[in-house]
Amino acid sequence: MPGRLPRVLRGKLLPPAMAIVFSALLCTVALLISAGSPGTALAAMVSQVGKGTTAVDILNSATIYYLIGVAVAIGFKMNLFNIGVEGQYRIGAVTGAIVGGATNLPPVLEPLLVILSAVAAGALYAALPAILKVTRGVSEVITTIMLNAVSIGILALLINEKTFGVLVNNNIATKPIPQSGWIPGVSFGSHGTLFGFVVVAIAVGIAYWVMLNRSRFGFELRASGESPTAAMAGGVNAKRMIVVAMLLSGATAGLTALPELLGRDHVYTQLSPQGYGFTGIAVALLGRNNPGGIAFGALLWAFLDQSAVSLDNVGVPKEIVTIMQGAIVLSVVVSYEVIRRFELAAEQRRVGAQLGTATVAAAGGAS
């Protein structure tokens, strides 16, 4: 037990520590190449948090990143690389916007209908690659990438004046969601308004933690991801787990655009923010698919995004933030793999030593 504890701490704490050091070195080199001062750049980014609406903007962005990060992590837990969360969240968003614009239910019921519609649409869009995988063995990577492209065409078809689109401020968008469907935020005056949907994001995080650690499904999900053969030997239906995991991933992805849709924009357009799906992959990698880790990754990513505007003021190109984000993700992936191999080699040495001791003892007893 005393030896086990240090190994657990080493596996949990050493990889992120290595990632922080390695990414800091890479970012420092990039800043020096761009003739910028690392200390000045970091100070400018940190000080930006206290200016204007930056702090609230970070929390709002982190809410979105957290939802999409959890969606990706559910697939990762099953060893499914659901790249299609980009298309799934956009299909969920446009479906929720269309349903919300076409109805006018009382408060609470109206936003609930929008949320359920978005969740259902995201899940159904994720069902396509899941069915193809379990029935024909088609890689979910290929199908989800293709469906991301298809979603762009679907949006163009749906957000059209001949279908569900209307002209809103010189832009084609879905019909505005009535005020009864809005989710009010928390106002901080001149510092901005925090999305009320942050409560839903917290609930999703709690549900994800409970599912992973306190439910049979979560155990089967983790077991299937770690060792599909052993899970099948234990009676787990692998095909069912794939379908359910993809449906849950798509359903969670469907929530991604709702903080902005129900809390700020109230319409959805072809020009609405996109690219959240790929951010979600990075955030899930940063958080190692852990609910708390994903929250940290979402906050870090949002901080880098929102504080980048301050770099222009100190003569550093704000594009350096993209390098920082890439370096951080790369560092996390590399550090965890290095520690995994180190632990594996150490375990093999321990087993070898024990076998050697047992062999010597057996030989001594025989003599």
Image: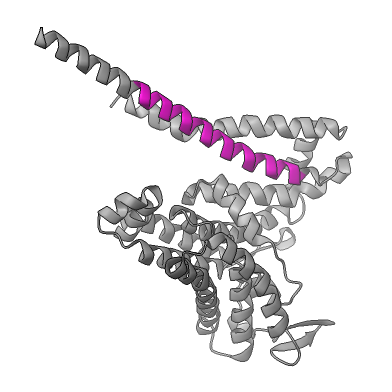
Q: Is residue 326 above or below residue 337?
A: below
Q: Is residue 84 visible?
A: no
Helix, strand or loop for the magenta stretch, by majority: helix
In the image, what residue occupies the spot 43% across and 58% down? 208
Classify residue 149 by image quadrant: bottom right
Query: Which region shows up in magenta?
Result: 321-349
Relative to 303, 290 lies left or right: left
Please, which residue is most extreme toward the bottom here?
A: 162
In percent of width and height, residue 239 lies at: 38, 65
Relative to 232, 335 lies left or right: right
In percent of width and height, residue 254 lies at: 56, 70
Q: Is residue 116 visible?
A: yes
In the image, what residue occupies the spot 73% across and 87% down? 165
Look at the image and say whether residue 231 sits in the magenta stretch: no
Q: Is residue 89 above or below residue 227?
A: below
Q: Nearer the viewer, residue 7 or 225?
A: 225
Q: Is residue 79 above or below residue 247?
A: above
In percent of width and height, residue 83 lies at: 59, 60
Numbered marks: total: 0
In percent of width and height, residue 86 lies at: 63, 65
In the image, what residue occupies the spot 59% across and 86% down? 99
In the image, what residue occupies the spot 54% across and 89% down? 105
Q: Is residue 11 above or below residue 258?
A: above
Q: Nearer the viewer, residue 134 or 147?
A: 134
Classify residue 24 by image quadrant: top right
Could you tell me which quadrant the N terminus lies in? top left
Q: Nearer the viewer, residue 210 or 230?
A: 230
Could you tell me which quadrant the C terminus lies in? top left
